[in-house]
Image (cartoon, rainbow, N blue to C red):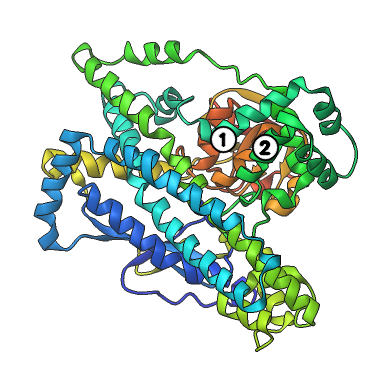
Amino acid sequence: MNDATELTWEPIGPGPWANDPVHFPRPVTRYWSETHPEAFAKGTRAFATYYGLLLEGLFTSYVNGFAFNQPRPVADEEVPPRFARAEEVIEGKLWREQLREWDEEKKPAAIAKHRQIQAVDPASLDDDELCEHLRSCRDHHAAMITQHMTYTAGAVIPTGDFVAHVGEWTGIPAAELLGLLRGAADVSAGGSDEMQTLMGIATDPAAMALLESDDDPGAVLEQLRALPGTSGAAVAGWLDLVGNRPADGFDISEPRVIEMPEALLKAMRVTIGGRDTGGERHEDLVAGVRERVPEEHRAFFDELLGEARLMYRLRDERGVYSDIWASGLMRRAALEAGRRAAARGSLTDPLLIVDASVDEMCDLVTGTGGPASDELEARGEYRRTHSAKDAPPFVGEPPVPPPDPSGLPPAPRRMMTAMGISLDMLFGSSQAEHDEDRLRGLAASPGVYEGPARLIAGPAEFGRIQQGDVLLTPATTEAFNILLPLLGAIVTDNGGLLSHSAIVAREYGIPGVVGTREATERIADGARVRVDGTAGEVVVLG
């Protein structure tokens, strides 16, 4: 494939398009670039309409495999009804209705559908049935991408609203204010009913002996699953919940957790053994901030904090229980297609299939055509050897600042301000200058930790992570939290204070510095570093 310097960056359409290195630090597969854009736009249109935002939606397109996003303003004739809707949302706190819908309808239905697909063994299907299954998995994946995006505003607007108001009253930095949300998103620390049940095997000597054994990790997992009684059921229940999630990212190029048994066992040992998440008591943190709020605003402060904490878990839940799981199921079906194509001699390696489109997968399964191994290998090599740093920050017309919401009526002004702050906290990296051995990013999670930096470009390298390492990576996604118990601290190139990396660092109680822009280029793998998540600095010690 072409070197990045040889690529052309043609405008996708009118207006500026911004590179998204937070969610897509690497180029995507052909499958993803065909599946994602329409489903993504559909979901963003839904949340913009629901919340009365002055946006038509957010749109994504792919240039040379890289993701570029564009927000589009709503049509003029839609402005008055959006103003009215914003007033309804604020007056009725209608994000609560979305949370009720999520908890009672959408999340249970999604889990049921995931489990229904998961119960189908792709290896048991004939070739035509497998092609039908591939398309069914693709359609389900697209629906889950839409679902993920539909709940985005509900997940972030109450948080942005809280930060906007309290920041204005007190001048307290957003990073400190976000610390008051810690503990409100159990899912971001890997929490689930199945995880709570799994913790019970700590009292089973046979289970713990297996967990600590040096036998083949895959065999150990199967033996744990096969244990009699409650221990085996607990392991099976947890693996059935998380096993088909990608270890990181959203694309089918990423291995599922179950494909990484060694890393999975390491994380299980730490989780079941327990870890001290430390930190100042939540009540004390809240009291300290509340004292700095003018007395006339304290009742409103309590209300804003309550709404932000109520909705905070939706930030990660909407991904973990929607497209994260669906992506892993699509990959499982694709790998069976790759196995058959390799057995037929159409592919030299079953894993090459992840770089095919669904139609190409079916052609390879049925022996009616499809790309050659060399072509798929070239696509995969391009993905593995390029990163978002090889792409320009924008394509198309020069970027323009977002509209100033200060002239809007109160309700839409409040809504657009909250959304704008939230988007900045999702995507905005630090612009602070670095010194030779000191990098500056965003103070995502407080505390100081010293340890070896483990430079991880992607899930294929997760096996190198040892307990106590400092994760050094471009970015992480919701899927990554299964492996986070191993870490002493997190440092990323991309993302802001509401990026996944920042949220999970806070929930796990480990220091985090995000949005450094250059950490993965300037810190060598294995270097000893000091991560100061309070100051937002990373110092290379040697």
Left or right of residue 227: residue 275: left
Dot 1 amino acid type? Val
Does residue 253 sit above or below 291 in this rendering?
below
**Nearer to me, 505 or 429:** 505
* Residues at circles 1 and 2 in contact by the CB criterion of under 8 Å: no
Dot 1 or dot 2, earlier in sequence:
2
Apparent side of residue 309 relative to residue 472 in the rendered image (left or right): left
Q: Residue, x 51% and y 69% (percent of image)?
A: 33
231 or 247, which is in the foreground? 231
- Check disc 2 and give the amino acid type: Asp
Q: Which residue is mark 2?
A: 437
Query: In terms of image quadrants, where is residue 511?
Result: top right
**Residue appearing at x 64%, y 65% in the figure:** 333
Instruction: Label 1: state its secondary structure.
Output: strand
Q: Nearer the viewer, mark 1 or mark 2?
A: 1
Quarter in which the C terminus is drawn: top right
Q: Quadrant of the N terminus?
A: bottom right
Residue at position x 60%, y 17% in the image? 278
Residue, disc 1 = 513
Please indicate, yes or no, whether residue 191 appears anywhere in the rendered image.
no
Of residue 126 and residue 165, the one placed in the foreground of this image is 126
Given the current orientation, which residue lies at the most extreme right position? 215
Per the image, label 2 sits on a secondary structure element best described as loop
Left or right of residue 114: residue 73: left
The image position of residue 228, as x and y in percent, is 78, 33
Give me the residue at 28% from left, 34% from top: 161
Q: Position of residue 129 (x, y in %)?
A: 60, 74
Query: Which label is found at residue 354?
Result: none
- Pinpoint residue 123: horizontal percent, then vertical percent: 71, 66
